Image (tube, rainbow, N blue to C red):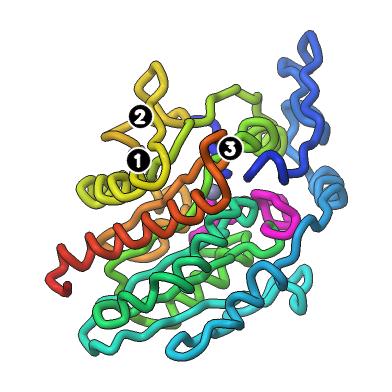
């Protein structure tokens, strides 16, 4: 399988570790990450070192919980657990908006599965604040705006155990972030028509997080390129390409769509139609594969373009959410 790909944070806010590429070869691999021995998977000591070098950069309470707590009826806010690293600091919150229509289908919106991907979190919150009520007559909405709040605060892709939550949506998950969300969604016991998972792909993926995962797993680092613009990930087992196209068309009104590279690819995966790639979402344990929804997609906003601002990125996420809901409703006979 190809080396794990990442999607990701704004390099102006992301902490950067020095990436040293030494000349020559060490055990068959150049040294490309400051923790561990190239070619040897990390053990507990390396993971502990990695954790010790993280620091809190921003506030989940101020940026996220306060905005969730400000939502009033008919929004319902519920807790579905807390992260064991600090349960007081990291309660996990989900927002439900029940439809006035008893026959309305259910839609799920998730953000911050990768906590460092800022517009995934803020886009979900902005959607709740500005758009969600427009759908109350036709949809039941469940929104988990910040699945990985520790990752949000330390601006990192992994959880405190150096585990990527977005490879962990499966049984016996090593990620509490994933396991608790899986349990919460299962506990609702409702069929979802749609699930949209909000992400970013950023320059720090190539500078920090792809080297980190290669180092952690004892693999060589193979440089890649970061797409310049927005794209979506479809599930290769259920791509729904017309649905993906509707999202791309809506987001194109807000920000530019990533062109493919010279190999016809985006971030190492074949572009199947403009701005769309496919991953095997269930096989890879991606959040997008956690329900059996008919319509699923992962958004990948690119915040590091000189043309992008935080507001544009958030509005791109909201546009993607609106387009996905509108398409699902129009094609389910419920609109
Ligand atoms: Zn991501």
Q: Report the residue marked by disc 3.
A: 304
Q: Residue furthest left?
A: 333
The secondary structure type at the circle numbered 1 is: strand
Instruction: Check contact, mark 2 vs mark 1: CB within 8 A.
Output: yes
Q: Residue 41: image x %, image y %?
A: 72, 37
Residue beneath the point at 62% across and 61% down: 175
> Is residue 232 rendered to the left or right of residue 105?
right
Q: Report the residue marked by disc 1.
A: 278
The first of marks 1 and 3 along the sequence is 1
The first of marks 2 and 3 along the sequence is 2
Residue 251 shows in this picture: yes
Label 2 – label 1 distance at C-alpha: 8 Å
Quadrant location of the C terminus in the rendered image: bottom left
Residue stretch rendered in magenta on the structure = 152-170
**Camera-side residue: 172 or 20?**
20
Q: Residue 200: image x %, image y %?
A: 52, 46
The first of marks 2 and 1 along the sequence is 2
Residue beneath the point at 60% across and 22% down: 223
Mark number, residue 270: 2
Residue beneath the point at 43% across and 51% down: 316
Q: Residue 261: image x %, image y %?
A: 41, 22
Give the prevailing secondary structure in the magenta stretch. Answer: loop
Q: Residue 293: image x %, image y %?
A: 30, 64
Instruction: Check contact, mark 1 vs mark 3: CB within 8 A.
Output: no
For residue 86: magenta? Answer: no
The secondary structure type at the circle numbered 2 is: strand
Label 2 – label 3 distance at C-alpha: 22 Å
Picture quarter containing residue 22?
Answer: top right
**Badge 1: few (under 14), some or many (20 or more) residues near its Cα, within 10 Å?**
many
């Amino acid at each position: 399988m190809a080396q794990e790909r990442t999607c990701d944070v704004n390099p102006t806010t992301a902490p950067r570790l020095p990436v040293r590429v030494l000349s020559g070869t060490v055990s068959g691999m150049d040294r490309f990450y400051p923790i561990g021995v190239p070619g040897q998977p990390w053990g507990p000591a390396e993971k502990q070192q990695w954790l010790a070098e993280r620091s809190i950069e921003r506030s989940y309470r101020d940026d996220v919980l306060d905005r969730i707590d400000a939502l009033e009826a008919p929004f319902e806010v519920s807790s579905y657990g807390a992260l064991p690293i600090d349960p007081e600091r990291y309660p996990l919150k989900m927002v439900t908006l029940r439809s006035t229509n008893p026959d309305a289908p259910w839609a799920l919106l998730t953000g911050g599965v990768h906590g460092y991907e800022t517009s995934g979190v803020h886009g979900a919150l902005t959607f709740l604040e500005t758009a969600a009520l427009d759908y109350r007559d036709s949809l039941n909405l469940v929104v988990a705006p910040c699945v990985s709040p520790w990752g949000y605060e330390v601006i990192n892709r992994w959880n405190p155990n150096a585990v990527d939550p977005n490879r962990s949506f499966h049984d016996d998950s090593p990620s509490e972030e994933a396991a608790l969300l899986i349990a919460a969604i299962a506990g609702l016991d409702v069929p979802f028509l749609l699930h949209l998972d909000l992400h970013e792909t950023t320059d720090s993926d190539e500078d920090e997080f792809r080297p980190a995962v290669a180092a952690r797993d004892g693999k060589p680092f193979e440089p890649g390129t970061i797409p310049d613009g927005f794209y979506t990930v479809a599930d290769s087992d259920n791509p729904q390409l017309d649905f993906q196209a509707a999202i791309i068309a809506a987001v194109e009104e807000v920000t530019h769509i990533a062109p493919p590279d010279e190999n016809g690819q985006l971030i190492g995966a074949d572009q199947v139609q403009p701005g769309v790639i496919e991953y095997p979402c269930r096989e890879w344990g991606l959040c997008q594969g956690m329900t059996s929804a008919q319509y699923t997609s992962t958004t990948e906003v690119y915040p590091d373009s000189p043309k992008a601002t935080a507001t544009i990125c958030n509005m791109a996420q909201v546009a993607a959410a609106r387009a996905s809901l509108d398409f699902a409703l129009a094609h389910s006979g419920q609109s």
